[in-house]
Image (spheres, coloured by chain):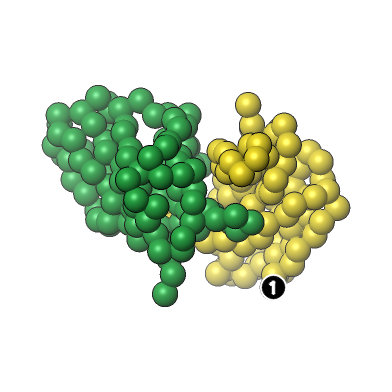
Amino acid sequence: DGGITQSPKYLFRKEGQNVTLSCEQNLNHDAMYWYRQDPGQGLRLIYYSQIVNDFQKGDIAEGYSVSREKKESFPLTVTSAQKNPTAFYLCASMGDRTEAFFGQGTRLTVV
Amino acid sequence: EDQVTQSPEALRLQEGESSSLNCSYTVSGLRGLFWYRQDPGKGPEFLFTLYSAGEEKEKERLKATLTKKESFLHITAPKPEDSATYLCAVHPYAGGTSYGKLTFGQGTILTVHP
């Protein structure tokens, strides 16, 4: 089955810690996206990538970092510089002439 | 910069009471407008893509329409299981083979009471 997989589903971070969220797709899509969603809010773009080894900042990139070493994978690191990281994180991928497909999300909580 | 505004923020309907959700957008050149449904704690589920003004698409009780400035999601005779957050997003032309940003609105929270 083709799809996009995010892991873990739930993640807890201590103050000052970096954590990495995983996003893997087997749809052979070129573009991948990371969004943040706060309660009752829409999706805000963190980073996106259109090709391997290239990525662009979205609207709220501060305190986050990404890499795109493989077409299938686009991990997101939430660094200690992100002061309010508690949120629901969504990864998406898009191919030519397709809609964006989403994973099931990772809920990150600071403890 | 691309902008997407959805209204209303929340909508409460009685079962069978038809209504419409609005998505107003500003984009330099529209490649596509997407509608998604999102249930609590889940990733968005794709509903429709609209590409050009005048286009309409239907799926069960839902019908999406598009003009040059806005899109509507019409819900006919809704049922409680239609309760969810409905999101729209614009995908702009980014030049060549570039995909570009995908910008979402804030969503409309729909609640349908039995």
Would you say A69 lies left or right of B66 here? left
Residue B55: x and y in percent read 82, 56
Where residue B67 sits, quadrant-wise, is: top right
What colour is chain A?
Answer: green
Give the residue displayed 40% in from the left and 64% down from the top: A26
Q: How many numbered badges does the structure rendering display? A: 1
Q: In which quarter of the image is the C terminus of chain B?
A: bottom right
Residue named by callout 1: B60
Task: Give me the chain letter of mark 1.
Answer: B
Q: Which of A28 and A19 is in front in this view?
A: A28
Colour-to-chain, yellow: B
Callout 1 amino acid: Glu
Can residue B84 be seen by looking at this rendering? no
Most extreme residue toward the right is B54
Give left or right: position of A97 versus A41.
right
Question: Which residue is located at x 61 percent, y 44 percent?
Answer: B97
Task: Reply above or below: B40 against B22.
Answer: below
Tell me what residue is drawn at x 58 percent, y 50 percent. Answer: B87
Q: How many other residues sit within 10 Å of disc 1, few (<14), some (14-19) or many (≥20)? A: few
Residue A29 appears anywhere in the view: yes
In the rendered image, residue B5, in percent from the top left (x then y), is placed at 65, 37
Q: Which residue is drawn at 49% across and 43% down?
A: A50
Residue A81 percent across, percent down from the top left:
25, 24
The foreground one among B22 and A50 is A50
**Place of residue A57 in the rendered image (x, y in percent of width and height, measured from the top left):** 44, 30
Residue situated in front as seen by the camera: B35 or B99: B99
- Please give left or right for residue A26 compared with residue A20 in the image: right
Q: Which of B51 and B76 is in front in this view?
A: B51
Please determine whether, in this image, residue B55 is positioned above or below residue A3: above
Tag 1's secondary structure? loop
